[in-house]
Amino acid sequence: MTPEPYRFPLNRFMSDKAFNRIQKFSKNLKTPCLVLDLDIIKSKYKELKKELPASTIFYALKANPHDEIVLLLNDLGSHFDVASTHELDQLLRLGVSPERISYGNTIKKRDDVEYFFDKGVRLFVTDSFEDLRNIADKAPGANVFFRILTDGTGSDWPLSRKFGAHPDVVYSLILKAKEWGLSPFGISFHVGSQQRDIGQWDEALARCKYLFDAASEAGIRLKMINLGGGFPANYLEQTNPVINYTSEIKRFVEEDFADEHPLIYLEPGRSIVGDAGVLVSEIIRVSKKTKSSYQPWVFLDVGKFGGLIETIDESIRFPIYVDKAGKEEEVILAGPTCDSMDILYEKFKYTVPHSIEEGDRVYILTTGAYTQSYCSINFNGFPPIRAYIIK
Amino acid sequence: MTPEPYRFPLNRFMSDKAFNRIQKFSKNLKTPCLVLDLDIIKSKYKELKKELPASTIFYALKANPHDEIVLLLNDLGSHFDVASTHELDQLLRLGVSPERISYGNTIKKRDDVEYFFDKGVRLFVTDSFEDLRNIADKAPGANVFFRILTDGTGSDWPLSRKFGAHPDVVYSLILKAKEWGLSPFGISFHVGSQQRDIGQWDEALARCKYLFDAASEAGIRLKMINLGGGFPANYLEQTNPVINYTSEIKRFVEEDFADEHPLIYLEPGRSIVGDAGVLVSEIIRVSKKTKSSYQPWVFLDVGKFGGLIETIDESIRFPIYVDKAGKEEEVILAGPTCDSMDILYEKFKYTVPHSIEEGDRVYILTTGAYTQSYCSINFNGFPPIRAYIIK
């Protein structure tokens, strides 16, 4: 039962240099805290832009709304995909132009449509007649794009039927949009977050092509395809490099739209900021439940309610690093609250050096996305984790 | 496929009078918001105290840490079960005596033990040698109680092996506690939140009896049994009235401890505050995904990240009320964020009046526990829901 000495492949997830910088920076910080490296975000943005230069990137603000990230991406020329009036207010406060903002949430109140329009936003997603009617009334003449249903097969954090409508419904929406004085602008889809099956984009693009053609026959020229997000971050599960995604996507677009390329919009979130974050935590306890059990429980000072909610059903497996060498053993990882749901990994067994003990630091990598903003406000009295920026 | 006219049995969950008061109070409040009726909390506390007059109630603060609830329960004579230094600070700020506080989290840092001891707390739970060692060092002479593992069978929100240790380990802990100068005070267990199988208490009490006897043979007289929480709130799933629980528990205690009754401690949370809360929400959209689907999606302005995290796996089914009559239809209920996980009920089909529409208010009952403090800090930009008190 004793595993061989083992060294966690840290540099599969982050360069030694970047990690050392974060380790040093956080040395005297109170745990838990999230450290975000802006250089990594910058390079992720530039890499995607380089691979798809003709595309427009709408950073999905919900992935990590830290002001410093917004300022950086705004400087780099990014556009922004926004989910609520609160997010809009933040972007405007930081000087982002409303022309660079897309109201990308299909579930919006009538008053919120008006709010966005008044602030200068002219790009709205929709997937229902009710929402379209609100947009026509409150954002007259705006550009609308239509979200089609996809099933999210192949993604680690699958989307569902919550967003989007069947292509038949979308076709009717396109016609209605024109009738109601709006500008039918394009089609969007989302293949599911952390999507590892590149073919999913192909299938969705084929549906877009069908709708482009159908609209064209009705005298409406759609101009844009919004590919949504879904590009992966580096979690334990192996993924393809971004270039594999982008080159395939370019090929799919070429195949389906050889005559005239549509505008390509992207809404990456996780793939831009995920790899840039390290959640620094401390071991509160290593203990065994029974005298004979050989898998100790390792309790960290951060858990599901402190930002790691994506460990639900153990969906996302974060790389976890302890700065110790030596023989490894399997453990169960759990968070600090009195909630029994606050277990990080029990079925999937992480291994850590046998020598770990109370007070040791545990670095949870690839935690730049969907962590800090997900924190519960004060469950068990614990405040949300603090985030720090390294430039 | 057309259900008959149907009226939601509101008064199974809340009196018409109490509901009307909340409806009137919230009429002009911005949704989503949580309204808490202190009268209900008061009567729930008194009911439990009346049924088990010899017991000491430690309110599990994590269930709802609103200041007004603390003040009320403190006035009524309640003690408090606390999970973190942050919760301790809150209680002391509000004038709760440290003698009425139990540090009920088995996962605590060494420094936090010292913090509690310095503030005057003398009652600590434990389930491991490492934690016990910290208590011996940082809280010398304190009363400690030992949590045994239970499996949580029969509960809607089961606990797991995260808390507690096997009775054999607990026996060794009791001996060590004495050796290390602490006062071995009692045994605790937790049958799982929203526990509907009353027999679970019987089984756990039998284990306590075994440990009381074993300790006694070693010359240690344990004095207390902490029955934890687990008393239910009124969700859709039918439960027994509190009196069924308390009378059975009294009988079990009588059977096992006929010679000398131990002190009985309780840690109710959900059963005290759950029924007192109504989450007031608004319908953002009612829409269909395909032309032929007959189950519309109903999107509310509150969801999993706005306090309803216990809808994960549809574990807790909240009573949901719309103030409209008429034919009912099955719907899928979802929240307002761009996260596809933010669906409340899809497998279990709620029915609502066919006439519901955008802007209608939806009242989610029995939301006084584990809602507001669970809210994410700003996911999708949405702020945590605001809570209001009715006295």
Image (spheres, coloured by chain):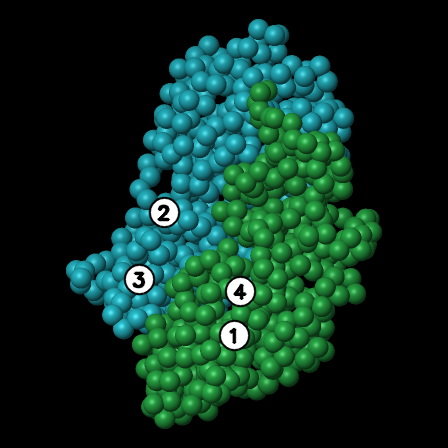
Chain colours: A green, B cyan
> Depth check: B92 or B5 in front?
B5
Mark 4 is surrounded, within 10 Å at the Cα level, by few (under 14), some (14 to 19) or many (20 or more) other residues, namely: many
Q: Amino acid at mark 3?
A: Val
Relative horizontal placement of residue B157, taking residue A229 as reference (left or right)? left
Q: Amino acid at mark 1?
A: Arg
Taking the spot 67% from the left edge, 37% from the top edge, the residue there is: A352
**Quarter of the figure with residue B20:** bottom left
Residue at mark 2 to residue at mark 4: CA–CA distance = 37 Å
Secondary element at image label 3 = strand
Using the image, name the chain to which the residue with label 1 belongs: A
Q: Nearer the viewer, mark 3 or mark 1?
A: 1
Using the image, name the chain to which the residue with label 4 belongs: A
Give coordinates of residue A48: x percent, y percent: 64, 71
Q: Nearer the viewer, mark 2 or mark 4?
A: 4
Residue at mark 3 to residue at mark 1: CA–CA distance = 40 Å
Are the residues flagged by discs 4 and 3 from a single subunit?
no
Q: Amino acid at mark 4?
A: Gly
Q: Amino acid at mark 2?
A: Tyr
Find out whether the residues at labels 4 and 1 contact each other: C-beta distance under 8 Å: no
Residue B20, visible in the rendered structure? no
Taking the spot 54% from the left edge, 38% from the top edge, the residue there is: A346
> Depth check: A249 or B99 in front?
A249
The residue at which mark 2 appears reads as: B235
Secondary element at image label 4 = loop
Give coordinates of residue B224: x percent, y percent: 55, 21
Are the residues flagged by discs 3 and 1 from a single subunit?
no
The residue at which mark 4 appears reads as: A230
Taking the spot 62% from the left edge, 16% from the top edge, the residue there is: B172
Res A251 label? 1
Are the residues flagged by discs 1 and 2 from a single subunit?
no
